[in-house]
Image (spheres, helix red, strand yellow):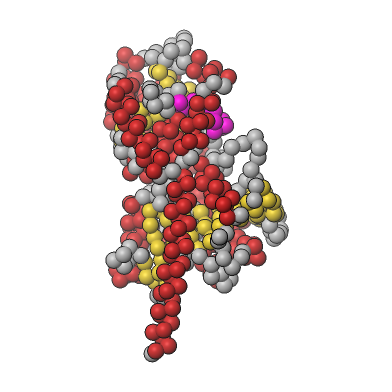
């Protein structure tokens, strides 16, 4: 069996007290089957040149973590990754702050990743890199002579060429992606955007009729692999957490009111300001709900040292204050807004108690919270998911109430529709979405990508052999 090597920006060693997150569940399952290796930054910075990886083995999986230079990490992560690529890929070009210094740090960190990973590789490895932090890693590994199959999966959206061209080095980014044998995206829209870039840079002939991409003597497989969740684990967590003290205290505090809930990392792409505005309009236009509904928004702080995130936090605090100041009563607070983390199981217990789930990002690669909301519900009395049509999950969860997150009036109407939806309709919508979740769960995602990576390497080898024969004949 070929060994899987996963590479991601950040990895954490598993702890007995903490369950792995959604992505880690799928990756760990595949790594355990192959006795695999997970490589990435361990969360520590240093002043000088990073040393050799720290190696730890847990349940047959090898974890290799490295340090990064403090100054370089800031430029690579908070700078180029999250001040350039993140806003650009989410179509927020005004938020992009490009500098050559940041790009050089991004390139250098990817070089360090490749150099430290190289000695750990084995001849039959399948290498799978994750997300926008590591786009150049494939090229860096090829430069070091790596011939093993290389795969890359982008967890966030991929922009159309007309947006991508805002980036001064967009051509280099596209070329870097062609260093991989398999490039995976969340949705067909993302794949089409990638094709638009390939056609712009390499010409229409690079796009083959079978969907593959031909660059010189290389054959690249670019496809859609929608990431899923561990449905059974979420169901079990939600049921078990419902009986815990923290969840019971939350539900008791509602005093019989319906719960509307959102769980989002604090980020301008999540549409929280627009969502708060929609909730205020909902209270204005449907005053019969005053005192009968509580909106709980959990938004853990993220990237607090990036300017845009401090601004979004201030805007949300002001919005929540305005709504509560206008509508609150002595025994009722319309919005409960919390900037803190909760254990995943606790969140699933909260979500199970919600009558309405609000997942309204301005743009999102997939959004696993939408899928977790569905899986966590009680099938006998499920809540209703309000989902942004601009999230990748909307391509699968078509039985949700789909909304345009910029349409404040439309979202407020959806809130009322969700609260008044009959039980039979809620059950039908929930059952339809559960079928999709089970078909495209996290295990299916990892299996499909690994199969594509193995098959792509075989196809690429055949192309190389044919090309070599042609050149010899000439």
Q: Residue at left 56%, top 57%?
A: 4
Task: Decide which of 120, 434 is in the foreground and name it.
Answer: 434
Q: Position of residue 180 (x, y in %)?
A: 47, 64
- Displayed quadrant of residue 462: bottom left
Q: Residue at left 39%, top 89%?
A: 473
Quadrant assignment for the N terminus: bottom right
- The secondary structure that dominates the magenta segment is helix
Work out whether 348 lies above or below 129: above
Work out whether 374 lies above or below 287: below
Q: Magenta stretch containing residue 313, yes or no?
A: no
Q: Magenta stretch containing residue 350, yes or no?
A: yes
Q: Position of residue 332 (x, y in %)?
A: 45, 13
Task: Decide which of 263, 451 is in the foreground and name it.
Answer: 451
- In the displayed structure, does residue 450 sit left or right of residue 64? left
Tally the marks: 0
Q: Residue at left 57%, top 65%?
A: 124
Q: Position of residue 363 (x, y in %)?
A: 38, 43
- Residue 465: tell me if it is visible: yes
Q: Which residues are magenta?
A: 341-352
- Residue 337: tell me if it is visible: no
Q: Residue at left 44%, top 43%?
A: 441
């Amino acid at each position: 069996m070929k060994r899987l090597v996963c590479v991601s920006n950040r990895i954490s060693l598993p702890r007995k007290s903490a369950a792995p997150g959604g992505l880690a569940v799928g990756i760990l399952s595949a790594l355990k089957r192959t006795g695999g290796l997970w490589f990435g930054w361990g969360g520590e910075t240093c002043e000088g040149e990073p040393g050799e990886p720290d190696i730890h083995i847990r349940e047959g999986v090898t974890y290799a973590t490295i340090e990064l230079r403090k100054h370089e990490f800031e430029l690579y992560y908070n700078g180029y990754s999250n001040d350039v690529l993140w806003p650009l890929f989410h179509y927020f070009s005004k938020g992009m702050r490009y500098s050559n210094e940041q790009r050089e740090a991004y390139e250098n960190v990817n070089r360090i990743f490749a150099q430290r990973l190289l000695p750990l590789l084995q001849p039959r490895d399948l290498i799978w890199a994750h997300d926008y932090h590591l786009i150049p890693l494939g090229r860096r590994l090829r430069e070091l002579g790596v011939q093993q199959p290389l795969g890359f999966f982008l967890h966030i959206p991929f922009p159309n060429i007309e947006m991508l061209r805002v980036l001064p080095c967009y051509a280099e980014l596209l070329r870097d992606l062609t260093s991989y044998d398999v490039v995976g995206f969340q949705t067909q829209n993302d794949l089409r955007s990638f094709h638009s870039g390939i056609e712009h840079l390499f010409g229409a002939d690079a796009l083959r009729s079978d969907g593959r991409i031909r660059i010189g003597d290389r054959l690249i497989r670019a496809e859609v692999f929608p990431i899923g969740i561990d449905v059974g684990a979420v169901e079990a967590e939600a049921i078990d957490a419902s009986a815990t003290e923290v969840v019971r205290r939350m539900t008791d505090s509602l005093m019989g009111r319906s719960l509307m809930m959102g769980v989002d990392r604090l980020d301008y792409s999540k549409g929280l300001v627009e969502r708060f505005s929609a909730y205020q309009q909902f209270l204005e236009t449907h005053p019969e709900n005053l005192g009968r509904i509580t909106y709980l928004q959990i938004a853990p702080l993220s990237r607090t040292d990036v300017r845009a995130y401090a601004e979004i936090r201030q805007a949300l605090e002001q919005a929540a204050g305005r709504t509560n100041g206008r509508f609150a009563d002595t025994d009722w607070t319309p919005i409960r807004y919390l900037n803190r983390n909760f254990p995943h199981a606790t969140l699933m217990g909260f979500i199970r108690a919600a009558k309405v789930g609000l997942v309204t990002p301005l743009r999102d690669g997939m959004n696993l919270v939408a899928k977790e909301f569905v899986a966590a519900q009680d099938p006998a009395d499920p809540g209703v998911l309000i989902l942004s049509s601009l999230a990748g999950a909307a391509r699968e969860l078509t039985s949700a109430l789909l909304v345009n997150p910029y349409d404040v009036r439309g979202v407020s109407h959806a809130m009322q529709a969700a609260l008044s939806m009959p039980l039979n309709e809620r059950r039908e919508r929930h059952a339809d979405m559960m079928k999709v979740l089970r078909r495209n769960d996290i295990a299916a995602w990892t299996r499909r990508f690994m199969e594509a990576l193995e098959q792509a390497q075989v196809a690429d080898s055949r192309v190389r052999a044919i090309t070599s024969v042609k050149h010899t004949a000439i």
